[in-house]
Amino acid sequence: MGSCSTSFLDKIETKYGFKPSAKHGFSVIETIKAMYEKKVKVFFGLGGNFISAVPDTGYSAQGLANCNLTVHVSTKLNRSHLVTGKEALILPCLGRTEKDYQKSGEQVQSVENSMGVVSSTKGILEPCSDDLLSEVAVVCGVAHATLKHKTKVKWLSYKDDYKLVRDDIAEVVSGFEDYNTRLKNPSGFYLPNGARVRKFNTKTGKANFSVNKLPEWKLKDDELIMMTIRSHDQFNTTIYGLDDRYRGVFNERRIIFMNREDMEVRGLKEHQVVNLKSEFKGVKRHANNFKVVGYDIPKNCCATYFPETNVLVPLDSFAHTAKTPASKSVVITVEASV
């Protein structure tokens, strides 16, 4: 574990009076396997659509089903709610567009964008129900009920005033100094970014570049390398419409983009319906009824939409350091649908 992580754990210990574990938790890949093997008994999700985001849909769904309890804290229904453990809860919560009233008044939250900028956010709509809790209130309530007086963390105070959460973050997490003050800036503030300020914590004090070898794919004559992609009308797993203006596809998502020469070799026509198959370490996976679309894509490659073909992505194929599923490099075969 690096010195930065050690420093962070030391700050937590100083602030809250307990020694946090230095042992790494599970990655998503490891969590799914542990649930499948019944080593993890409770799944608790804050937002998101877990089953649509992870690889190997069938295996992952069985992992969730093997849990004793699955809990989803959500602003709206999604497919993950249909895959339940032995007991299952859906806890509706306030959305970010809704006003968040707590004991100290109307709350302000913060968000971080993909550029590393933290800014404030505040709902403008009245809550659709007086019974809705915020995500913060749910987490704090669960923590208080579980730990009670065994902790120095003032969970119920956090629930009443989110500024207190940010004050503690400012003490413990580097880059968040004067959190509440800087959050008042209309444009927000940047988190530390070594590249942005030309500061590199390396032996040379300069950025170090590495060259990584590309994998040497040895495909059989009928195999293709599939990558999963997203459409124009999509944000993460949320699909707002069936159009993809980027690629000229409308009112359809069960699409496989193929090089036209690869189509010709296989005797496939535009918009022909095909079935897709993948095999990894002896395990076969299937995704049926996709329409072929000829596209300017390299030979021996193809593309399909995420999450429709997550079912083809092997759980055991991932980046070994980041544990990210290899969703851009899935070997598949394409067969005409009978």
Image (spheres, grey):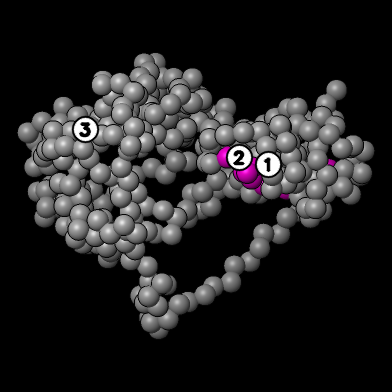
Q: Is residue 274 left or right of residue 191?
A: right
Write the residue at 33% across / 37% down: 124
- Residue name at image x 15 percent, y 46 percent: 164
Give coordinates of residue 225: x percent, y percent.
Answer: 73, 48
Work out whether residue 172 can be spotted. no
Kindly identify which residue carries mark 3. 101
Q: Which residues are magenta?
A: 221-234
**Residue drawn at 13 percent across, 33 percent down:** 103
Alpha carbons under labels 3 and 1: distance apart: 39 Å
Residue 314 in percent (x, y) is at 60, 39
Most foreground residue, 145 or 101: 101
At horizontal 9% and vertical 35% (from top left) the residue drawn is: 150
The C terminus sits in image quarter: top right
In the image, is 89 to the left or to the right of 229?
A: left
Residue 180, compared with residue 210, is above or below; it is above
Q: Residues within 10 Å of mark 1 (few under 14, many from 20)?
A: some
The secondary element bearing badge 2 is classed as loop
Helix, strand or loop status at disc 1:
loop
Task: Sort mark 3 into few (<14), some (14-19) or many (20+) by Cα contacts within 10 Å.
Answer: some
Amino acid at dot 2: Asp
The residue tagged with tag 3: helix, strand or loop?
strand
Q: Which residue is mark 2?
A: 233
Asked whether the residues under the numbered discs 2 and 3 touch, taking CB atoms below 8 Å apart as contact, a structural biologist would say: no
Does the magenta-highlighted stretch encompass residue 228? yes
Query: In the image, what residue type sits under mark 1?
Result: Asp
Q: Residue under circle 1? A: 244
Whether label 2 touches label 1, CB < 8 Å = yes
In the depicted structure, whether residue 318 falls above or below residue 181: above
**Residue 278 image label:** none
What's the CA distance linking mark 2 and mark 1? 6 Å
